[in-house]
Amino acid sequence: MRPSLRQKAVAVCDAKIAQKGEGVGLSFYAFFANRNDDPELLMEAATWWIRTHRLDHFEKAIKIRRMVLDRL
């Protein structure tokens, strides 16, 4: 995962956790605007989420944050 996507993922997780608590879930779509303005980046996130880690559609933000920070 490229550094800019890692930074964005951590920032989104932090914001969601601050807003809704540690039990909040999210999908990789949370890292993007409602329109698909960067398909390559979206596919990179989807590949990391689905193919590499075989995560469910929704996962706990705290889990995703930890995985990204641990560079998994």
Image (spheres, rainbow, N blue to C red):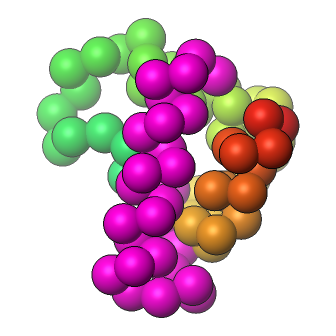
Percent position of residue 9, x then y: 49, 44
Main SS class of the magenta portion in the image: helix
Q: Number of callouts in the render?
A: 0
User: Which quarter of the rendered picture does the N terminus lie within?
Assistant: top right
- In this view, 3 is above or below 56: above
Residue 19 belongs to the span the image colors magenta: yes
The x, y position of residue 8, in whole percent, is 42, 39
Residue drawn at (52%, 49%), measured in percent from left and top?
Answer: 10
The residue positioned 39% from the left and 71% from the top of the image is 16
Query: Looking at the picture, how far across and down is residue 36, in whole percent?
Result: 24, 26
The residue lying toward the viewer, choosing from 70 and 28, is 70
Work out whether residue 44 or residue 51 is closer to the camera in this orientation and state it. 44
- Report the side of 22 relative to 18 (left or right): right
In the rendered image, which quarter is residue 56 located in? bottom right
Q: Is residue 29 visible?
A: no
Image point 48% across, 88% down: which residue? 21
Q: Is residue 19 above or below residue 30?
A: below
**Residue 47 found in image quarter:** top right
Q: Is residue 2 magenta?
A: yes
User: Can I make out residue 69 in this image?
Assistant: yes
**Residue at x-position 48% and y-position 60%:** 13
Q: Taking 17 as reference, is 62 left or right?
A: right
For residue 67, above or below residue 19: above
Q: Nearer the viewer, residue 59 or 17?
A: 17
Task: Give the magenta range.
Answer: 1-28
